[in-house]
Amino acid sequence: MYQPMLYLHWKQIKLVLIPFVIGSFGLPLLTIQGLGTNGGTTVVEPMTALLSAQSWLTMYPLLAAAVGITLALSAWNWDHQLDHVYSLSLPISRRQYAMMKMGAGAALALLPVAALWMGSLVAASVVTLPAGLHAYPNQLALRFLLGVMISYATAFAFAAGTIRTTVIVLSAVLLYFLGGAAAQSYLAVFIPFFQHHDLVGNTFNVLLTTGPFAVFTGSWVLIDV
Amino acid sequence: MVAFGALAVAAPAAGQQTEQDLVRRLDGLVPQWEAAQAANANLRERLAREVGRRNGAVDTIRVGPLTMLVRPGRDAVARDVVGTVWRRDFTGWVDRSPALERTTFFFDWSADRKRFDDPDGLVRVIQGSSHDSRKTVEAAVRDAVGDVLQWDLTHSGLADWPDWRVYIASPTPRARLYREMVLSSSTAVRSCIAGDLPECVSATVLKVDAYPLDDWYSPTERLALGSAPYSPWHTTESNAPGCFRNDVTACDAALRTLLSPRDYLLARPRPSSMRGSLLWFALQEGGAHAWSHLLAGPGGGLQNTLESDRAAEIISYVAGEPLDVVITKWRRWVAEDRPVVDAGFGRILGVTLVWIVLLSALAMRSKRCRLG
């Protein structure tokens, strides 16, 4: 049952996934462009090298999120189109079905991750870095893997539910952060507790440090000191 | 023979006379010293009265060498917090500070914090509310004491070169300094952090040659400095054409002609916090009398700036060790805290895996028959 599901998902996503794989392989190579390669004579100053590498830094988490979300939405695409008739016709529970579907998407997510890892290793082996700077291909690939997987899991969980549930959850989150901040400012005038406690800000900080997207806040560097 | 004999007789007499002169002059200073002490005590008394008039009753307490004003009944917390900071951060290297002796601090860390009224700025105020953590209040105490300590250096030559005197109480964190040194635009600084100790002497401006730029910067870096649009020396294609034509020899020749030694110092290697860190480290190495040694300087008062060979002498004197030993230890101390790129990644890994499992479980809970 798992193999057909994997094949089905691959068939549906391959035209989107192949550019992602190529992009994942090429991004580390773009990151080191202009820094000089082994055998060459150009060695730039460390600060220039780092700034050049950092200009690509935001692309990594964006790519991870894009890969994860695309895979998750495509996993449920044909179910939504056919009103879930296919899954109802299968002799397995809904839980097993969702688990297999999730596993198939996760396996496909490994393709861009492996491509980024390979690209990072190639980039690290060919670049000539100024003294004091180092390349971190393995750490970057691991971070990319986690970024892809958490984006995939989040989007998959939303896509597995109904549109109504998704709208309710997202609206509640938005209401809390946008409305909560305004309400807090208003309440602070009357209740001293809110003058000293930033509940919305603290929630945001907790989400950044221990929330699902904590991995996106770290250092996504291929080159650093 | 006669001349030698005359010198042998005259020398002790001259020495004795000098000693007697000095004793007489010192004795002559005693009344002035006593008057200054009395004036200082009088000033403190008046200050306490004035503060009391404006802010209600305050008690005066001593914590180590610090004179503190506290509200009645709050002396215990002041002794605890300020005493902890003093013992931990200053006792090891500050023995005596004229600035601290002159200064009165006001300390208050309480829930019902009232603004301290001191329009003349005569008192150094350290206040924390109940929302401030002990760490925050301790940092405020450390910064206040560190600021006052810097006043000791105001009338020394160090005042001209803030590189050396900033961060006396709180030096730049080592990991940040390491990063800044690795990313420095100066070859000497980068070589220093990589372990080349002679380069450290140049990089920290402890040795300044007639033309120091070639000690600090590589030829490419000198060309870049000479031709930079933001060059502090206002070099142009007309007065330093070599720098714009990638001719290092011509560029160096032009810079030698154009610039005075003080101009060179405008391009001293960055980060400037490196020099403050070295001075702080030397003070820690120097132990209990390090601060007095810094103020006194080797062989007399601290008259010169720390920008020449004398700087090396002062650093060595303050640390009580040969310069190469201090530099070696300082470099190793900075390099020990090299930034860790994947610091905290274990926690992020754990957190992310937990969330992936949680979100997967939520996805599994979706109902079999649900349309819409």
Image: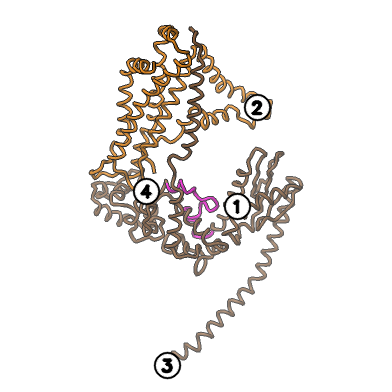
According to the image, label 1 marks what residue? B145
Query: Which residue is tagged 4?
Result: B232
Question: Circle 4 — which element?
Answer: loop
Which chain is represented by orange in the image?
Answer: A
Asked if marks 1 and 3 fall on the same chain, the answer is yes
Provide the secondary structure element on which disc 1 rests. helix
Question: The residue under label 2 is which amino acid type?
Answer: Ala
Marks 3/2 same chain = no
Chain bearing tag 2 is A
Separation of residues labelled 4 and 1 (CA atoms) = 35 Å
Tell me the distance, in whole angstroms, between the alpha carbons under discs 3 and 2: 95 Å
Asked whether B175 or A76 is in front, the reply is A76
Q: Is residue A117 placed above or below B311 in the rendered structure?
A: above
What crowding class fits label 2: few (fewer than 14 Cα within 10 Å), some (14-19), or many (20 or more)? some
Alpha carbons under labels 4 and 3: distance apart: 61 Å
**What amino acid type should be assigned to the residue bearing mark 3?**
Met
Q: Which residue in the protein does label 3 denote? A: B1
Sequence-wise, the earlier of marks 4 and 3 is 3
Find residue A50 and report its horizontal and vertical position in percent.
36, 40
Kindly indicate which chain is depicted in brown in the rendered structure.
B
Task: Report the front residue among A45 and B325.
Answer: B325
Report the magenta residues as a range: B155-178
Q: Which residue is mark 2?
A: A188
For the point 47% across and 13% down, the residue is A93
Discs 4/2, front: 2
Per the model, the C-alpha gap separating discs 4 and 2 is: 50 Å
Q: Position of residue A209 (x, y in %)?
A: 52, 32
